[in-house]
Image (cartoon, helix red, strand yellow):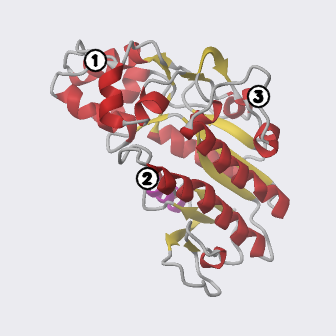
Amino acid sequence: MRMRVAVTGSSGLVGRALCAALVSRGDEVLPVLRHSGKQASSGDCLWNPEGPSEATALPEGTDAVVHLAGAPIAAKRWTDSYKMVLSTSRIEGSRVLVDAIERLKTKPAVLISASALSVYGEDSDRILNESNFDESQITEGTLEPKGPGTGFLTELARGWEREVFRARAVGVERVVAFRIGLALDPAGGALGKMLPIFRLGLGGTLGNGKQWMSWILLDDLVRALLFALDNQALDGPANLISPEACTNKVFTRALGRVLRRPAIFPVPAFLLRLVTSGFADEALLVSNRAVPAALTNAGFQFECEDLEQALRLAVL
């Protein structure tokens, strides 16, 4: 059945790929465009994380919403002002989007939102699945007795999901929060920062290289978004990463082989902290060993689970 799918962040890397995939299978895409702040009129498809709430609007007849918008995590140093931008774009942006859904007479059947593995915090010892921090803990603001540590990215992801899951209370039957790990995207994120160094033959492990990295190929990421639109079995938090996590040492060696460059120059943790501010401790040096339990239990099959193959597809 043809769907009308509203997509925030439609001009981003994932958004563009998703919109193309939706169109190719016959769905109608409604790009939710950034708005200047004026009150929206009937039929508009607009998003404004700064508010007022009425400046974000969706048209009646929207079957599904995919929420991918948010300021890029690794684009700038984490000054207090940029942290505010990150928080506003995710937490406030999700709040006004859910408010727009609430104003619709007929609610979309599903809201799918990006989230992040940082919701778990630093946790080096466990293999993490969605039960380690589930929807009830997000909405009620509780932690496990031996729960993970917290930081800016952790609190950001939890606040983000808390607003997203509020969609249930306004009448959305199914809500999926995809906790995304390292998307293998040469244009941005951690891989984008690493590639120029590795291409010069100056790459190596980050810190001690023992931290776990959970990754996913962009094609599988988009396929999972489509799967979530179509499959009622997927509902709630879902880790969106390949089943095969690896340590940073394994990852950097594989990247060096793919680029045919040595990967023998470790980057000390203190230097990463100096260059990237808080991003190093909460993204580059943090350890998250997660599995996509919710996705695989719902029947999703990954096309690329091999790291080296995924890196070749991503960067060559």
Q: Please say whether residue 123 is visible from this viewpoint.
A: yes
Q: Residue furthest front?
A: 80
Residue 82, given in percent of the width and then of the height, sits at 43, 52
* Left or right side of 192 for 213: right
Q: Which residues are magenta?
A: 15-23
Dot 3: element: helix
- Amino acid at circle 3: Ser
Q: How many other residues sit within 10 Å of disc 2, few (<14), some (14-19) or many (≥20)?
A: some
Residue 169, given in percent of the width and then of the height, sits at 84, 59
Question: Where on the picture, by quarter, is residue 315?
Answer: top left
Identify the residue at image location x=39%, y=12%.
208
Vertical comparison of 89 with 221: above or below: below
Residue 128, given in percent of the width and then of the height, sits at 66, 23
What residue is pinned by disc 2?
82
Residue 204 is marked as: 1
Q: How many other residues sit within 10 Å of disc 1, few (<14), some (14-19) or many (≥20)?
A: many
- Amino acid at circle 1: Gly
Dot 1: element: loop
Q: Nearer the viewer, mark 2 or mark 3?
A: 2
Q: Is residue 14 magenta?
A: no
- Amino acid at circle 2: Tyr
* Left or right side of 6 for 35: left
What residue is pinned by disc 3?
131
Q: Residue furthest bottom?
A: 41
Vertical comparison of 296 with 108: above or below: above
Say whether disc 2 or disc 3 marks the residue closer to the N-terminus: 2
Check the picture and name the quadrant holding the N terminus. bottom right
